[in-house]
């Protein structure tokens, strides 16, 4: 059964997600629609990009991924389809799709232009239903990505804060706080090796309100309840956690806040 995934910042209170699913199923009756999440922080393209990037490698080849975090809906930003080696992405050209698409091997991108890939009436505020869901339904039903419109040569890049080693410290930013309060940073896991951190070594983590000592750990259970741990996260990025508590609350940090991690000598 063909699969379409959905990611958005629409939440579950309103019927917006159901409307998108209805349009997809109207265009492909036998597909399966899977929710990645609809709890992206409102208008937070970086958070949506991260959640999409980390979810899509788990899906079967040929999946169509629809993502809508679109504060620029109704503007001149393009509605696009990205064809990858192993999947298709549908959504706004605002940086939301690009990192996930590159992970799956970008082949080409196309602007959604042709009328058969839109509803008869297109709202200026709900392209998720009126453009992206129609396109996704038709694509998962077998139409080719190149049939949606002309090729796009350059896609909008997402300005993701990087990480750097500077004067013996790993300087990075928060890119996501998960449901447990774990802080996922912009530093790739191998940054801990470059920093010289060994398992069990004491580390100092500086957040918004001050600095806190913790340990470099392989798993949460290697530190005591309430103790801070810095570890290689399951999503490929350095993670700061407090066992059975919230690291985000301790450090008083949220998305895009700065963090500094250094060895305790």
Image (cartoon, rainbow, N blue to C red):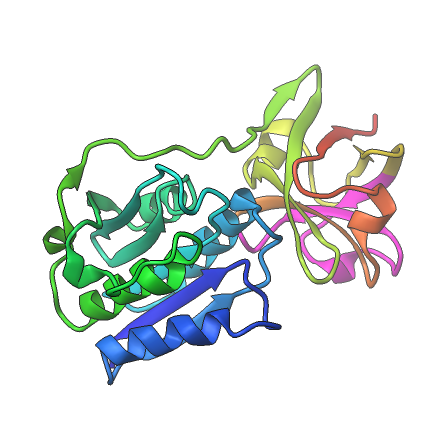
Instruction: Name the spot of residue 81 as percent of width and height, x first.
Output: 25, 51
The reply, left or right, for residue 214 in relation to residue 19 is right
Indicate the quadrant where residue 238 lies. top right
Q: Nearer the viewer, residue 158 or 189?
A: 158
Instruction: Name the spot of residue 88 as percent of width and height, x first.
Output: 25, 57
Which residue is located at x 58 percent, y 56 percent? Answer: 40
The reply, left or right, for residue 200 in relation to residue 113 is right
Establish if 104 lies above or below 59. Answer: above
Residue 61 visible in image? no
Establish if 93 lies above or below 136. Answer: above
Q: Nearer the viewer, residue 262 or 27?
A: 27
Viewport quadrant of the N terminus:
bottom left
Viewport quadrant of the C terminus:
top right
Q: Report the span colored magenta.
A: 213-235
Residue 56 visible in image? yes
Q: For the view shown, which residue lies furthest in the front direction?
A: 121
Instruction: Name the spot of residue 11 as percent of width and height, x first.
Output: 59, 66
């Amino acid at each position: 059964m063909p699969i379409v995934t959905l990611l958005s910042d629409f939440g579950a209170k309103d019927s917006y997600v159901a409307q998108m699913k209805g349009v997809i199923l109207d265009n492909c009756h036998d597909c399966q629609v899977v929710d990645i999440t609809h709890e992206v922080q409102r208008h937070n393209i970086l958070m949506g990009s991260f959640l999409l990037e980390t979810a899509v490698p788990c899906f079967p080849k040929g999946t169509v991924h629809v993502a809508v975090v679109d504060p620029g809906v109704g503007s001149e930003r393009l509605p696009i389809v990205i064809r990858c080696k192993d999947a298709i992405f549908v959504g706004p050209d605002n940086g939301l799709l690009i990192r996930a698409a590159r992970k799956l091997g970008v082949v080409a991108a196309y602007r959604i232009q042709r009328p058969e890939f839109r509803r008869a009436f297109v709202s200026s505020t709900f392209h998720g239903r009126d453009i992206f869901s129609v396109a996704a339904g038709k694509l998962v039903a077998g139409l080719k990505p190149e049939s949606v419109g002309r090729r796009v040569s350059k896609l909008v890049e997402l300005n993701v804060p990087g990480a750097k080693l500077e004067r013996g410290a790993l300087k990075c930013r928060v890119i996501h706080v998960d449901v447990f309060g774990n802080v996922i940073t912009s530093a790739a896991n191998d940054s801990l090796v470059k920093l010289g951190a060994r398992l069990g070594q004491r580390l100092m983590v500086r957040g918004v309100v001050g600095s806190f000592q913790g340990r470099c750990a392989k798993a949460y259970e290697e530190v005591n309840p309430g103790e801070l741990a810095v570890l290689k996260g399951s999503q490929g990025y350095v993670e700061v956690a407090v066992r059975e508590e919230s690291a985000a609350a301790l450090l008083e940090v949220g998305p895009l806040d700065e963090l500094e991690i250094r060895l305790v000598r």
